[in-house]
Image: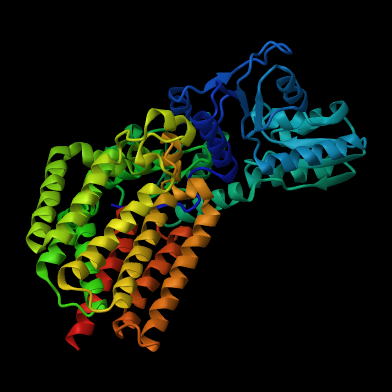
Amino acid sequence: MKTRLARTAGFCMGVRRAMELTLAAAHTEQDKVFTFGPLIHNPQVLDLLADKGIEVLKEIPEPGSQEGGTVIIRAHGVPREKKERLKKAGFSKLIDGTCPRVTKVQAIIRGVSKKGGNVIIVGDADHPEVVGLLGHAVDNRGYVVSSPKDIPGLPNLEEVTVVAQTTQNGAAFLDVVGALKQKFPRVKVHNTICEATHNRQEEVRRLCRDVDGMVVVGGRQSGNTKRLYEIARDSGARAFLVETEEELAADELASLSDIGVTAGASTPNWMIKKVMRELSGIRSSKESRLGYILRQVFRFLVAGQVLVGVGAASMAVAASLLQNLPLNGSLIMAAAFYIFAMHILNQFLDKEAGQYNEPARAHFLNQFSWLLIGSGIFAGLCALIICATLGILPFALVTVMSGLGLLYSVPVVPKFLQKKLGIERLKDIPGSKTISASLAWATMSALIPAATLGMSDPANTALAFFFTLCLVLVRSAIFDILDVQGDLIVGSETIPIMLGEKRTKTIMWVITFGLAAVLFLAPILGQAPTLAFGLLLPVAGMAVMQLVLNRAWIMPGALSEGLVDLNFWLAGLVALIWAAF
């Protein structure tokens, strides 16, 4: 079965911002954290926030009656009067999580009504966003219209300004505007439908022309999710609306060969991924048995970190030849075993975040836990034994790294420093996971071969170390950006969370172009073999994957992860071809 995930599926900017503000408050604020009303229309997210101790504030306390705490205004926004009451209630902090797009509509309504104008809001009268928008109309100069049928009930006005609920159906909005122009002499229109909403709806229409069925993931109380389902249904495709993967009708879906998947603006990535995982396990009646088996084998190799282990061996080949060192099978195997063990065992240490970042992998870990843990321990011991046969220095380096790895999730910071530093474990150091993994790759690929076989040229060793370090840093940052939602939930301080996604992407491009410049100039300056030119290929491949994933040309999953790691294989292949000629 072929599945196509819409690029626009999942959290919109406003919902994502509100979620990030709420989760950040939950991890940093000492007092109780509240959201005024349900943060978003998704029951799974609301359950998650409740588990984090975040309470839903249903009524505004009397002025001065609240003893501290943080209250967050949800993405839909609130009427002005309620915002003022929240400020006077006695909360120690008020965080406005209103979507900036909604704030813009509020400003239009406030500005027009202050000047004596009348505003018509096209949307669902009971929707929290519309209730909030109406509360920004001065002197009750706001009216709500859901459809052309509501227009006869409006008073006779000389001039009206029309705005839209940001998640309104574009076609329905135009129908209402057309009817309003027939009733009122002067109509000024502000199409305030969020571009993300428009793009999401248009993508569903396009997808429905190419697929047999469309699965829409999201809460049934979410207006924009229901609109996506209606658009899919009206476009002629077989439409399915589900809140969780458990609601998928496997028997009905098995009769389809091409399925599109989209999700409402309040649907988290992990729920979309769970649905995608469940769909991937359904064998279409039109899919060959061989094709199904090959697809499952590939997923096993990716989730089981086999591709990463082979990638580490390939990087050891490239780094050795870049240093003009002879290839040594024991060193290559040591790198493969150690990196495989590190990635396998780290998955179990980060199991909580994995439930949200990679539900398919989390399911895989639960299914094969003892096999994977056993293979990870076995591979780690193999790496130690191999390095012990190579000499004291390689063995010492691997032992130290293994020791730090074992201590990574253990409280090692003295209690009197824990509060001051804000960390208990090495794991709590911001960005430590990305940096430590990159250093481990570079050490196994470049330093240990140099320590074992002798450093032929310090400059070449430095270049090999730098090449491996940068390539793995970029790889790690790519996945850290994709995993932001899950890491925020569990409180992991990754580089994208610490610096922001935009800055992280800028740093990734600086590293990529910096590495490319060094590899290009080093042979010209006589500081490296011509192999450095060839290694520009995997650097270019990693740059392409950054672009592909940033623009959602390929969605996160086994395929995208395999393509990213394929650049390590490419480095080894280029090095072997260079050595042969």
In the image: residue 30, left or right of residue 84: left
> Residue 518: x percent and y percent?
42, 77
Residue 90 percent across, percent down from the top left:
69, 17
Q: Residue at x 53, y 61 (%)?
A: 506
Total numbered labels placed on residues in the image? 0
Q: Is residue 387 left or right of residue 436?
A: left
In this view of the protein, can residue 285 be seen by the observer?
no
Q: Quadrant of the C terminus?
A: bottom left
**Looking at the image, residue 335 lies above or below residue 160:** below
**What colour scheme was applied to this rendering of the protein?**
rainbow
Asked whether residue 31 appears in the rendered view, the answer is: yes
Q: Nearer the viewer, residue 507 or 96?
A: 507
Measured along the vertical axis of the image, is residue 529 above or below residue 23?
below
Residue at 41 percent of width and 56 percent of height: 478
Q: Is residue 544 left or right of residue 120?
A: left
Q: Residue at x 33, y 80 (%)?
A: 532
The one nearer the camera, 227 or 278, is: 278
Residue at 60% across, 20% down: 69
Residue 363 image position (x, y, % from top left)? 25, 39
Q: Position of residue 376 (x, y in %)?
A: 16, 47
Closer-to-camera residue (286/486): 486
